[in-house]
Image (cartoon, rainbow, N blue to C red):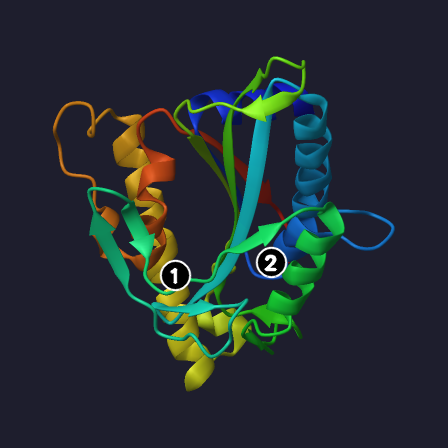
Amino acid sequence: MRLLWFLKLIVFLLGTVFAYGQTNSGKTHTMRGSATEPGVIPRAVHDLFDIIQQDVDREFLLRMSYMEIYNEEINDLLAPEHRKLQIHESIERGIYVAGLREEIVASPQQVLDLMEFGESHRHIGETNMNLHSSRSHTIFRMIIESRDRTEDGGGDSVSSCDAVRVSVLNLVDLAGSERAAKTGAEGVRLKEGSHINKSLMTLGTVIKKLSEGAESQGGHVPYRDSKLTRILQPALGGNANTAIICNITLAQ
């Protein structure tokens, strides 16, 4: 199953996994896991390295980035001094976050160490429903560049001059949907919850429009209504592969 997912990623270029649910439903644990029970991100990272190491016909270069969207502001979790980053678009790069750090990575442990560094700078707060509530959406991104190998006259493998294929995997930990009456949010927490709910509503609208075929029929899809959907626009439409993990809590 894991091989099929990543082979699709390499072929179809874009893949995204969301963890969605109410606050305190276990989304961050689902994505990160623990030392004894790895979550989606560490499992995906290890599987990805395993698979590319078995592919002797292509050579790979892997990069990663880690960002959060807090109150509709984009912060670089790998470079905490890079805050309030802007979304740009160009013919060459498509939609991208200007100034976002991308680290070249060579091992699963290097990736996970960078993830832990990024997590230490994420916005966390306390509400009545969750003592450690994530107050931002995070996008953990792996960029996989690959190209065919060829052999020289001596039988040694060398890089070809063929075009480089770029694939992107987004692993998204969404902040939890909230009701102020239950969370007891006020002041800063109330403002955070408002931004969270608005962006989640926009994401739901975008997915609904796409499922109705609005994009293919030339209709309007409101990607620009939130930073989250604008950043993920290339990974939601077209030939992208998308999976949503729905976390459910027994809390009423």
- Could you tell me residue 163's position as x and y percent? 39, 26
Residue carrying label 1: 197
Q: In the rendered image of this protein, does residue 140 appear above or below residue 5? A: below
Mark found first going from the N terminus, 2 or 1: 1
Figure quadrant of the N terminus:
top right
- Answer yes or no: is residue 101 visible: yes
Separation of residues labelled 2 and 1 (CA atoms): 18 Å
Q: Residue at x 20, y 40 (%)?
A: 221
Q: Amino acid at mark 1?
A: Asn
Q: Is residue 155 left or right of residue 64?
A: right
Q: Amino acid at mark 2?
A: Gln
Image quadrant of residue 195?
A: bottom left
Q: Is residue 77 left or right of residue 216?
A: right
**Nearer the viewer's eye, disc 2 or disc 1?**
1
- Could you tell me residue 63's position as x and y percent? 54, 48
Residue carrying label 2: 252
Badge 2 marks a residue whose secondary structure is loop
- Could you tell me residue 27's position as x and y percent? 62, 53
Q: Residue at x 64, y 59 (%)?
A: 115
Q: Residue at x 29, y 65 (%)?
A: 86
